[in-house]
Image (tube, rainbow, N blue to C red):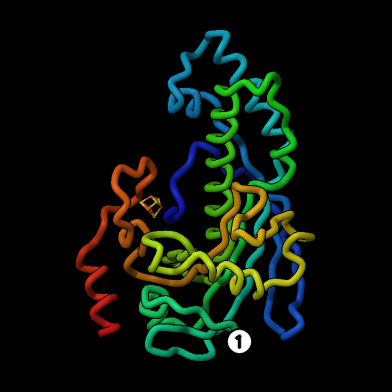
């Protein structure tokens, strides 16, 4: 998937980030009380649920359960680039191989590796009788919750580190070659106690559990990079930017 969206789940109030010091001396920040308020009317409209109907009441009930249950979380580090090679980059002793990442980080030295999740709690909500429609609703609410969590994380970093424009890259986003999904392992290795702090774990088959989780690197960029610009996939319902041949060529020409 690409970068964050503007969402119908509003952020409310303030949370208190919890700080932890990494063993190598880098700062790692865990955020586990992200405030949010789900706009059920807006989501109903997007899901074509007519307001005032029995279906809409059922949807509101589900939204209310998610509102009570969900505990989205995020974890990030403040990291510095050790080395830039032709097609790879080393951050806090961890090397990533990706032409696009290398190019995007050309003019920066500080980055923010992160993991964000809608949390394990919301996965424990039971949908009676395996109702398929309600499962789709829950999936959609969780998707929006994750995007809201990423948005919250970005705002926290912007305020704390006085940066204005942040873009993200995520292993596995865009075409498979852009930043291979296998490098999620290296990304997870940058953090300690991920599962304890966020509930997120990376399986041997490179799936993140809970599934509504994302890991990546945030970096300052004046050009608002989106992975969708480097993705050939046709008819993606959540595409956020058109494919950019110019950007694709510029990255791949750099390698020749
Ligand atoms: S266009 Fe590609 S990168 Fe963008 S959201 Fe769709 S699959 Fe993900």
* Numbered circles on residues, count: 1
Disc 1 marks which residue? 93
Pick the residue in front: 243 or 240. 243
Question: Which residue is at the far left?
Answer: 246
User: Which image quadrant is residue 190 in?
Assistant: bottom right
Give residue 131's position: percent from left, percent from top. Answer: 62, 21
Pick the residue in front: 111 or 158. 111
Give residue 44's position: percent from left, percent from top. Answer: 49, 23
Which residue is painted at 72% across and 85% down in the image? 24
Pick the residue in front: 132 or 45. 132
Name the element at disc 1. loop
Give residue 93's position: percent from left, percent from top. Answer: 60, 87
* Vertical relation: 143 (above or below) 74: above
User: Which image quadrant is residue 91 in?
Assistant: bottom right
Q: Quadrant of the C terminus?
A: bottom left
Is 88 on the left or on the right of 94, as rendered?
A: left
Give residue 111's position: percent from left, percent from top. Answer: 52, 76
Question: Which residue is at the far right?
Answer: 196
Which class describes the residues within 10 Å of circle 1: few (<14), some (14-19), or many (20+)?
Answer: few
* Vertical relation: 2 (above or below) 225: above
Is 30 on the left or on the right of 116, as rendered?
A: right
Question: Which residue is at the far front?
Answer: 205
Which residue is painted at 69% across and 19% down in the image? 129
Q: Is mark 1 within 8 Å of ligand 1?
A: no
Is 65 on the left or on the right of 166, as rendered?
A: right
Which residue is painted at 38% across and 82% down in the image? 106
Which residue is painted at 70% across and 39% down in the image? 123
Is 66 on the left or on the right of 106, as rendered?
A: right
């Amino acid at each position: 998937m690409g970068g964050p969206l503007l969402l119908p789940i509003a952020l409310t109030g303030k949370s208190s980030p919890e700080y932890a010091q990494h063993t190598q001396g880098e700062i790692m920040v865990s955020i586990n009380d992200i405030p949010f308020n789900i706009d059920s009317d807006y989501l109903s409209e997007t899901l074509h649920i007519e307001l005032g109907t029995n279906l809409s009441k059922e949807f509101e009930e589900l939204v209310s359960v998610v509102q009570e249950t969900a505990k989205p979380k995020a974890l990030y580090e403040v990291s510095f680039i050790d080395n830039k090679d032709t097609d790879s980059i080393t951050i806090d002793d961890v090397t990533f191989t990706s032409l696009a990442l290398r190019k995007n980080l050309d003019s920066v030295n500080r980055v923010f590796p992160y993991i964000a999740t809608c949390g394990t709690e919301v996965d424990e909500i039971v949908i009676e009788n395996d109702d398929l429609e309600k499962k789709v609703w829950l999936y959609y609410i969780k998707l929006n919750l994750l995007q809201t969590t990423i948005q919250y994380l970005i705002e926290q970093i912007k305020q704390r580190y006085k940066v204005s424009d942040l873009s993200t890259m995520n292993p596995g986003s865009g075409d498979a070659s852009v930043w291979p999904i296998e490098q999620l392992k290296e990304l997870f290795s940058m953090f300690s106690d991920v599962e304890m702090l966020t509930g997120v774990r990376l399986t041997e088959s490179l799936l993140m559990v809970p599934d509504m989780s994302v890991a990546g690197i945030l970096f300052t960029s004046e050009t608002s990079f989106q992975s969708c610009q480097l993705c050939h996939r046709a008819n993606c319902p959540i595409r956020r930017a058109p494919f950019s041949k110019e950007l694709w060529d510029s990255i791949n020409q750099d390698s020749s």
